[in-house]
Image: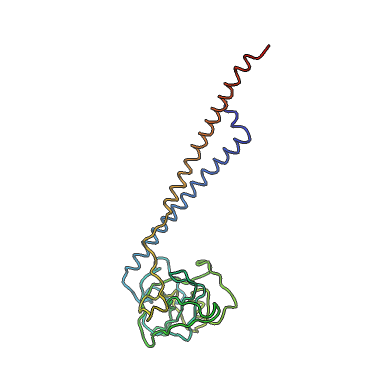
Amino acid sequence: MYRFLLSRQWVILTLLALVLIPVMIELGFWQLHRHQHRVAQNTLIANNLKAKPVPVTELTSPGHTVPRADYWRQVEATGRYDTEHQVVVRRRTNTDETVGFHVLTPFVLSDGRAVLVNRGWVPFGADQRTFPDIPAAPKGEVTVTGRLKADETTGTSGIKQLSDLPDRQVMLINSEQQAKSLGRTVLGGYIEQTAPAAPGDSPQQIPTPDSGSIGAHMAYAVQWWLFTAAVPVGWVILVRREVRDRASAATRSTPERETAPA
């Protein structure tokens, strides 16, 4: 009665089911790992944002790669803005998803070293290749507070480094890249400025990272595992239906053979 399982159609169907089961199990674990990563990141963001600001030189130094454990740590620095070497970072969005620039200004410390400060977002000027109008930074010695971030690279950000960029425009926030143009020592990573606030909210400060949303990854994981369970159940239902249909067909054909003329 089950010899139909050896037919081409049923062999293909069975093999498809056997392939789908491990694939969907793996997809479920992939979503679970994404959920766990998001929870861990939210915890890291929340804890680092709550921490008391420390001098930026305690967490980074020239050539230092900021580890993930120090992302969003509250840091402070005292010095002066070097607006002569200020650049803008292309293709950055604000909270309304409007494309513009981030304003990247070197901040010179008392020992002569510098740290990059992302002062915030400004809109385009006449077009994307024109250097925008940027509100002046405070003059003289000031204390800047912000969130520590790691240098951006194409590998970590997915942003391609383009050639033939307009003057004073860059694609990535990278301390080693800026150190070459500044001619001075630059601390690794950069600061997303949170204080002092710019007059008139321009440049617009970078929003505080979200530490509360966890997304739907866990729901997707459960969904994939339910699909996994449904595959063998569905296969059994189809087999039983095929057996029932074949038995019914056989029953209908039996009387016809018995009454046929000799």
Pick the residue in front: 63 or 102: 102
Q: Position of residue 90 (x, y in %)?
A: 52, 75
Residue at the right extreme of this rendering = 262
Rendering coords of residue 121 (x, y %): 45, 75
Q: Residue furthest top?
A: 262
Q: Is residue 168 above or below residue 227?
A: below
The residue that appears at 37% across and 65% down in the rendered structure is 45
Q: Residue at x 56, y 72 (%)?
A: 161
- How many labels, in total? 0
Colour basis: rainbow
Q: Residue at position x 62%, y 18% from top?
A: 256
Q: Quadrant of residue 208?
A: bottom left
Left or right of 145? Residue 174 is: right
Up the image or down, 113 lies above or below 173; here it is below
Instruction: Residue 127: give x, y in percent of width and height.
Output: 54, 78
Position in image of residue 159 (x %, y %): 53, 69
In which quadrant is the C terminus drawn?
top right
Depth check: give the residue in front, 175 or 6: 6
- Quarter of the image with the N terminus is top right
